[in-house]
Amino acid sequence: MLFNVQHLKNTELCITPFNPCHFLLSQKVLELDLADLSSVRKFADQVKKECPKIHILINNAGVVMSDTTKKHYTVDGFELHMGVNHLGHFLLTMLLLDTIKNTPSLR
């Protein structure tokens, strides 16, 4: 089971709800900032090195900014909502797609 967190200090908050009984699942936490495409690339490289099989990929993170009077941007210059909620996930999926497709018993 692989988790990604934007800030490693949030690791415990991420893992505990998913494995409350500490079943025999190996857990790994890697840092990922979807607002920085170099971080997405680094994360994907780490995943491919450490996880030869990916059975499922859940892209479930995003930002909601209630203050629409000020524009917010990613490190790469994209509008924050578009960069984090769409482009970061798209790039991550594309970078991991070969590994996902080559995983035996993929559903």
Image (tube, rainbow, N blue to C red):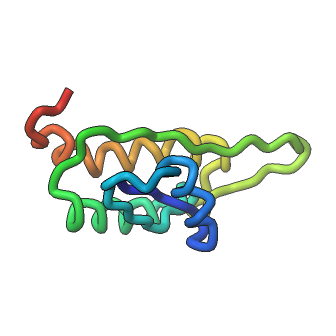
Compared to residue 55, the image places residue 70 above or below, namely below
Compared to residue 6, the image places residue 80 above or below, namely above
Q: Horizontal placement of 101 versus 28: left or right?
A: left
Q: Horizontal placement of 85 versus 70: left or right?
A: left
Q: In terms of depth relative to the viewer, which is nearer, 51 or 17?
A: 17
Q: In terms of depth relative to the viewer, which is nearer, 82 or 27?
A: 27
Residue projecting furthest to the top = 107
- Name the quarter where the C terminus is drawn: top left
Q: Residue at x 17, y 32 (%)?
A: 106
Residue 68 image position (x, y, % from top left): 86, 41
Compared to residue 5, the image places residue 81 above or below, namely above
Residue 18 image position (x, y, % from top left): 50, 47
Q: In terms of depth relative to the viewer, which is nearer, 11 or 86?
A: 11
Residue 81 in which image quadrant = top right
Q: In terms of depth relative to the viewer, which is nearer, 41 or 52?
A: 52
Q: Residue at x 52, y 40 (%)?
A: 60
Q: Residue at x 68, y 45 (%)?
A: 63
Q: Horizontal placement of 27 versus 66: left or right?
A: left
Compared to residue 49, the image places residue 78 above or below, namely above
Residue 88 image position (x, y, % from top left): 48, 49
Residue 40 in which image quadrant = bottom left
Q: Residue at x 21, y 67 (%)?
A: 49
Residue projecting furthest to the front = 21
Residue 43 in which image quadrant = bottom left
Residue 87 image position (x, y, % from top left): 49, 44
State how many labels appear.
0
